[in-house]
């Protein structure tokens, strides 16, 4: 699977900016949204090759949004990577149960992100 367009979902403007800059410097086209709700509503239209989403957001959490995306036949094939500043072992297990393809600790390290993306290709 080729990854060209990545959707970032995070309620923190700082984290969205950081990830956008990091990914664009690697040649990816990046779209950013600030809520789980907007991700679930717009993912099919945006049609990203990958979604990188924060876990802890107001409203729909990353876990809930991932579950919705993986259960929807239109978005089920879009891989999701979840991120959190407080990543626990149980969070990683729960993320996998919701259908996520991986988890990253914030602040996301470029090498970790590149390694996880290359596993999805």
Image: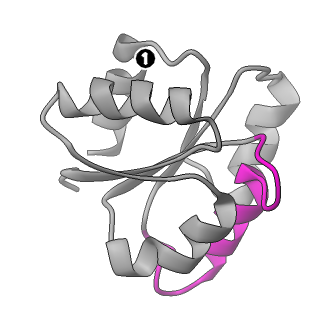
Q: Is residue 106 left or right of residue 121?
A: right
Q: Is residue 86 left or right of residue 101?
A: right
Figure label count: 1
Nearest the eye: 22 or 74: 22
At 45% across and 12% down in the image, what residue appears?
A: 109
Up-down: is 96 above or below 77?
above
On whether residue 121 falls in the magenta region, the answer is no
| Residue annotated with mark 1 | 112
Q: Secondary structure at mark 1?
A: helix
Percent x, y of residue 65:
69, 63
Q: Residue furthest bottom?
A: 73
Residue 53's quadrant in the figure?
top right
Residue neighbourhood size for the residue with mark 1, other residues' Cα within 10 Å, grouped as few (<14), some (14–19), many (≥20): few
Percent x, y of residue 42:
48, 76
On whether residue 59 falls in the magenta region, the answer is yes
Q: Which residues are magenta?
A: 56-77
At 43% across and 64% down in the image, what residue appears?
A: 78
């Amino acid at each position: 699977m080729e990854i060209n367009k990545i959707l970032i979902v995070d309620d923190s403007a700082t984290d969205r900016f950081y990830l956008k800059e990091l990914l664009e410097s690697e040649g990816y086209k990046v779209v950013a949204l600030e809520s789980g709700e907007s991700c679930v509503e717009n993912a099919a239209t945006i049609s990203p090759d990958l979604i990188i989403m924060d876990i802890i957001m107001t409203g729909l959490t990353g876990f809930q949004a991932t579950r919705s995306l993986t259960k929807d036949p239109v978005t089920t094939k879009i891989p999701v990577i979840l991120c959190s500043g407080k990543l626990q072992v149980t969070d990683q297990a729960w993320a996998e149960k919701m259908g996520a393809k991986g988890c990253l600790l914030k602040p996301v390290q470029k090498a970790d992100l590149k390694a996880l993306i290359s596993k999805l290709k």
